[in-house]
Amino acid sequence: MTSAPDFMLIGAEKAGATWLYRNLKPHAELWLPPEKELHFFDDKPRDQWRREKVLAQAQARGAPEKQLDWFRQFAAVDTSDLEAYKALFEPHAGQKAGEMTTEYAVLDEHIVAKIARAFPDLRIVFAMRDPISRLWSAYKMHMQQDEDTVPYSPDRYAKYLGRLPPQLRTDYRRTLSIWRKWFGRAAVLPIFFDDIETRPDHVVAQVLEHIGVKDTTPPNPEALERKVFAGDSAPIPKEFAAMAAERYLPMLLMMSREMGGPTDAWFLHAQQAFRDGHSA
């Protein structure tokens, strides 16, 4: 039985996971599943419906029979059976296999410990983005599915930012602490959305090196500059930015001290957003 996976990207939501999936999938030394996010370890009742929907979509677009076999297996997977999870990975000899489920960033520690016991040599990639920008991007995405007729209002912003899921998805220090505890600091690679925007070739090469493949050349140079799910470029509302800044300034101060790099700019952005939101 295969010991796959060899690597995981665990988040964060709206921080470049789909872009990275599309840039890594063509690599000859990697195997990634036809479906980017498997949601095995964060399984919820709705995920069974989602797996069945993914199968129906593959059938509707006329996917090859071999790929349909994988989607049928995926739709029927028992999320209490670790061997069934391993069987979803089909690497050829010499390939490293992995998956990318952004909700793994918010897993409870006991589940991360379970993953570590099953796959102690797993290589972890954690993509992060300026929290204010990430939250705004996620807010717009979720509001598209919301029936609220006034989605862009301070009251609505406060309600969203006060919910536990957005808070957990943005608590980068919690995620890093838990995963580093169980896998070791060297096994967890933080990457930054800022670098995806400014030097995407470096990010892909960095991830490939961390995973442990021989060829760290990006397999599809044309895809490096291609944005995924690019939204409108309208400015973030001052009220939303100020509320998010107030909530995450303490975390960003600590990250700036601990990590530097893009987190310095995130901290300064939050400081300015807080001032702008509370100016007379």
Image (cartoon, rainbow, N blue to C red):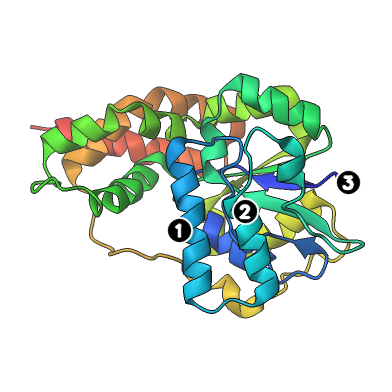
Residue underneath mark 1? 53
For label 3, the SS is loop
> Can residue 226 be seen here?
no
* Residue at left offset 53%, top offset 44%: 102
Label ID, residue 74 = 2
Viewer-proximal residue among 149 and 42: 42
Of marks 1 and 2, which one's residue comes earlier in the chain?
A: 1
- Name the amino acid, label 3: Met
Q: CA distance from mark 1 to mark 3?
A: 28 Å
* Residue at left offset 70%, top offset 35%: 81
For label 1, the SS is helix
Viewer-proximal residue among 2 and 122: 2
The x and y percentages for residue 51 are 51, 52
* Residue at left offset 78%, top offset 62%: 30
Residue 69 sits in which quadrant?
A: bottom right
Viewer-proximal residue among 82 and 39: 82
* Residue at left offset 65%, top offset 32%: 80
The x and y percentages for residue 32 are 70, 60
Left or right: where 17 falls relative to 184: left
Residue 243 sits in which quadrant?
A: top left
Of marks 1 and 3, which one's residue comes earlier in the chain?
A: 3
> Can residue 156 be seen here?
yes
What is the crowding at mark 1: few (fewer than 14 residues within 10 Å), some, or many (at least 20)? few
Q: Are marks 1 and 2 in contact (CB under 8 Å)?
A: no
What is the crowding at mark 3: few (fewer than 14 residues within 10 Å), some, or many (at least 20)? few
For label 2, the SS is helix
Left or right: where 157 falls relative to 244: left
Task: Please determine whether, in this image, residue 164 is positioned above or below residue 146.
Answer: above
Label ID, residue 1 = 3
